[in-house]
Amino acid sequence: MGTIWLVEDDRNLANFTRIALIKKGYEVVVFHEALKAVEETKNHMPDLILMDVMLPDISGPDAVKIFKKDPNLAGIPVIFLTALLSREESELGLTIDDINYKTLGKPYEIKDLMQAIENILS
Amino acid sequence: MFVTPFEDASILRKFTIFFLIASIVPMALLYYIYVQNGSGQHIGISSVNFTFAMVLMVLGVLVGYTSMRTLLKRVVNISKEKTAALGNLLSPETIKELNQGENEIVILSRSFSAVTQQLEDKLKKLKGMYELQKEFTATVSHELRTPLASIKMALDLIAEGTVGEVNNEQKDILLRAKQETDRLKKLIDDILYLSKMEADKLQMNFKMNDIHRVIDPIVESQKYVAQSRGLYLKTEFDPKVSQAYFDSDRVIQVMNNLLSNAIKFTKDGGITVKTRNNFSENCILVSIIDTGKGIAQADINKLFQKFQQIKSDQKTEEEGTGLGLAICQEIIVRHNGKIWVESKAGEGTVFNFTLPVQEMKQTQISSFDAYSHE
């Protein structure tokens, strides 16, 4: 099915999302800080990253900028999860350096999250 | 309205006449004397002219000085009045300090620079408040939506049987709890939306649009809801009405809100959506007319206030957030339009709103636009 990295600082939300993803058959690694995920790319590579926007160390978009600078990491697909935009507002997606990313506004539906992941990984 | 000292035309006129008499006439006479002398003519009469010219000149200087003093005093007085009218921008100590001193010009220049400084400080403060408001919205947004996302996710996981089997009764309870989280989510979205609108942070996409083309699909989609309740939903579009200057997404939002309210509060009959031109006010008028139970006068006055809701008779109805009409009003006002309601209890209700038919100037939309965009 694939390995998904979930970068989310809210412990409960990270845990519930992890459970939902595992039940669907994905392998999940949770990070509560963006830089830890950046660091981990030296050892492993995910198939997809679910990235929160407001994180305690650096923001999700800033972490993605770091990935994009590294040719080995630039191709990793990213879905943003954000509490800054409503579900309707997030439909347009976040744009960073002219690249538009699929974005889900919190609170998101499990089915919307699964659909977004399937669209990228299938 | 700003009044300049020169609006008092009589002073200006008097000053001009005195200036002519006091300066130009003696100058002309002196020139005449000089020419007479140069040509070697007799200068007997010229000495009389010379004395006369000198007297006029001294008189002119005196009159000119008095006029200037009067004018300057007026300027300083008006400046003081206007300074005071600006709303205590300057402290009494500052005003006292400003008024002490050498002469009117110094007082005037000090007064202007003090007011400029105060305005700059106010603007800085306002910008600071705007930044604070921006931060507040982001924090509220994050702090409210994140725990809500956890609750919703947990309820979803249990209700869908992801973490173990649930019986029908448990499922029903969980679904009701989930509906409540949806209501809470809608409320947070509405509060933040309204706060963004009020702070002028919401970008509007104004352009010329065909109003019927925008409204028609919404009416069609709501027709099914109306029909499922045994109500009609029809349009009476004026074919002469077409283009107006508006943000179509926002107007769709207004129409959806007004139509779903009309359906919610109508038991028998139905709803008619009408359009017509209002040439005298350079706008188009859209009316949503229902045959519902109407609204009492006391409730009409509260209708567009936040968190004011008129209770629906239908118990199964999904409750609103009490912000829908406040949002509609903000949207229409941002279009320089008007929104109002006509109703009598028992006689149905008409919601009207207007949209401009011509492009608006940006300054008409918002005075905050200069620093409202991120």
Image: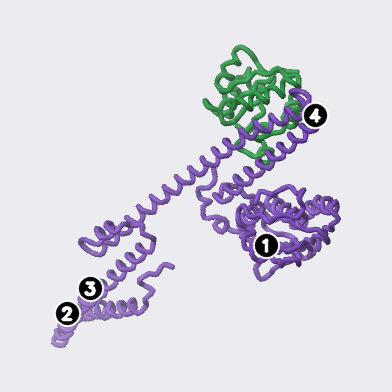
Chain colours: A green, B purple
Residue B316 picture location, percent across and down: 77, 48
- Disc nearer the start of the sequence (1/4): 4
Whether labels 3 and 1 share one chain: yes
| Secondary structure of residue under mark 4 | loop
* Tag 1: amino acid: Thr
Question: At 69% from the left edge and 49% from the top edge, which residue is drawn?
Answer: B320
Query: Relative to residue A105, is residue B300 depicted above or below?
Result: below
Residue B226: quarter of image? bottom right
Is disc 1 placed on a helix, strand or loop? strand
Which mark identifies residue B167?
Answer: 4
Identify residue type, mark 3. Answer: Tyr
Q: Is residue B117 above or below residue B173?
A: below
Residue beneath disc 2: B54
Residue B197, position in %: x, y?
Answer: 59, 50
Nearer mark to the viewer, of 1 and 2: 1
Res B257 seen here: yes
- Residue neighbourhood size for the residue with mark 3, other residues' Cα within 10 Å, grouped as few (<14), some (14–19), many (≥20): few
In the image, is A93 to the left or to the right of B241?
Answer: left
**Residue A64 appearing in the image:** no
Mark-to-mark CA distance, 1 and 2:
72 Å
Question: Mark 1 or mark 2: which comes first in sequence?
Answer: 2
Q: Is residue A101 above or below residue B244?
A: above
Q: Which residue is mark 1?
A: B354
- Chain of the residue on which disc 3 is drawn: B
Q: Which mark is residue B65?
A: 3
- Nearest to viewer (mark 2 / mark 3): 3
